[in-house]
Amino acid sequence: QVQLVESGGGLVQAGGSLRLSCAASGRTFSTYAMGWFRQAPGKEREFVAAITWVVGSTYYRDSVKGRFTISRDNAKNTVYLQMNSLKPEDTAVYSCAAKGVSGYYYSDYAYNYWGQGTQVTVSS
């Protein structure tokens, strides 16, 4: 099993920044990549970004490219999501997830483990 705990959410004004953290514990060696997803009220969960543990390859949804940066600290088994130039439409519950080798990075079906989520609210 892998346990994931997110932190760093909160309320910020449009144009501001937040950094989310996701600490992984347990059988982390069984995971290949980590992803961030978000879900706004009344909307489906959507992919935000992903990163592989070993090489550090990164993937982003188009709407966050240039504003969000995903990174990892292998020694701490922690993944970060730096969010800059936040917009009201970024408001959502953000969850981190862990996946194995198979499956698409942008598909939540590929992820086996999920954190509880952290709320990000961007005011206009």
Image (cartoon, helix red, strand yellow):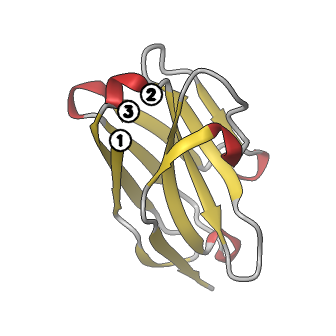
Along the line of sight, the residue nearer the viewer: 13 or 61 = 61
Place of residue 3 in the rendered image (x, y in percent of width and height, measured from the top left): 33, 48
16 relative position to 72: left or right: right
Q: Which residue is mark 1?
A: 2
The structure residue drawn at horizontal position 34% and vertical position 23%, both measured from the top left corner, is: 29
Direction from residue 18 to residue 108 in the image, left or right: right
Location of the N terminus by quadrant is top left
Element at label 3: strand
Give how far apart the Cα atoms at labels 1 and 2 are.
9 Å
Residue 47: percent from left, percent from top = 69, 50
Q: Nearer the viewer, mark 3 or mark 1?
A: 1
Spatial separation of the CA atoms under disc 3 and disc 1? 16 Å
Q: Which residue is mark 2?
A: 31
- Rendered view: 29 above or below 8: above
**Crowdedness near tag 1: few (<14), some (14–19) or many (≥20) residues, C-alpha within 10 Å:** some
Q: Which residue is mark 3?
A: 72
In which image quadrant can residue 14 be found? bottom right
